[in-house]
Image: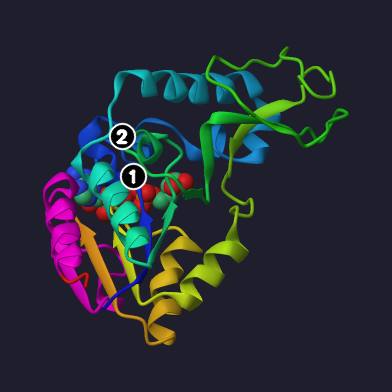
Amino acid sequence: MTKRIIVLTGAGISAESGVSTFRDPDGVWAKYDYQQVATPEGFAANPTLVHEFYNARRGSLDAVEPNPAHIALAHLEKELSAHGGHLTLVTQNVDDLHERGGAKQVIHMHGELKKVRCDATSAPSCGAVFDWHDDLGGDAQCPACGATGSLRPHIVWFGEMPMHMDEIEVALSKADLFASIGTSGSVYPAAGYVHAARGLGIPCIELNLEPSENAAAFNDAHYGKAGDIVPLWVDELLSELD
Ligand code: APR
């Protein structure tokens, strides 16, 4: 029986909730230049533009709800745990829909929209991370160290190291199954996890609207909308639980 499952999710799992994906024709990167709004250089050049970009995305979370795919993964987490197993839920997403869908442990490897960090290259900062649900601006004061202008979105920008990599690699090494849901497989290191899992002899399944860039690396796949195929996949997994 598959007991230790690691799931990697991407923007596609939140698409039916109304959160834009990145590389679909109407995606975020069709509207914004990622170099201006999602790189340290872009933030240094125009922090106001970057704050506006993340303030708009943070604010839009109030208008969206988790969909059946988020809820199904939370159910899988609970049922696996009740049967002596474990779900490691890793997401590239910075929204809070997995948590609002009921997931108790979520590893956000690209950060979170509803958190900010005191981290400035050109001013004193303390590195503290805070929950932050309102707009953030360049004049905000760090609640911990009092520095002004040192707060930035707690988001991993292009060129920065993703978070929790060690924890993810340990979970991957112990897994009986690796599942990738709603990601184009175009950004590393996340896109490389299927290759690492295959190298460890771990079965890999892709659930996506269409074959991703690394579809060939998977042993199995279900294609369709996450809100439809993820609950069915979870039910199939749980039917095998002894
Ligand atoms: N159900 C399932 N899959 C879907 C759905 C849906 N309803 N809608 C779209 N998809 C699929 C698309 O076919 C695509 O393969 O989700 C994937 C989304 O891919 P991207 O837009 O590239 O998003 P993602 O893979 O999460 O991007 C990875 O890139 O820009 C960075 O940091 C950003 O975390 C992001 C990373």
Which x, y percent locates residue 62? 37, 19
Q: Which residues are magenta?
A: 210-239
**Quadrant the C terminus occupies:** bottom left
Query: Vertical placement of 203 versus 40: above or below?
Result: below
Dot 1: element: helix
Query: Vertical placement of 119 versus 188: above or below?
Result: above
Q: Is residue 200 magenta?
A: no
Which x, y percent locates residue 238? 19, 63
Q: Is residue 221 magenta?
A: yes
Dot 2: element: loop
Query: Vertical placement of 139 versus 123: above or below?
Result: above
The structure's colour scheme is rainbow
Q: Which mark is residue 11?
A: 1
Specify which label sits upstream in the sequence, 2 or 1.
1
Q: Which mark is residue 20?
A: 2
Dot 1: within a 10 Å radius of its alpha carbon, few (fewer than 14), some, or many (20 or more) residues?
many
**Quadrant the N terminus occupies:** bottom left
- Amino acid of disc 1: Ala
- Amino acid of disc 2: Ser
Q: Are marks 2 and 1 in contact (CB under 8 Å)?
A: yes
Query: Looking at the image, which is closer to me, 136 or 1?
Result: 1
Left or right of 241 on screen, residue 157: right
* Residue located at (77% from left, 25% from top): 150
Which x, y percent locates residue 180? 32, 62
Instruction: Give the CA separation, mark 2 to mark 1.
Output: 7 Å
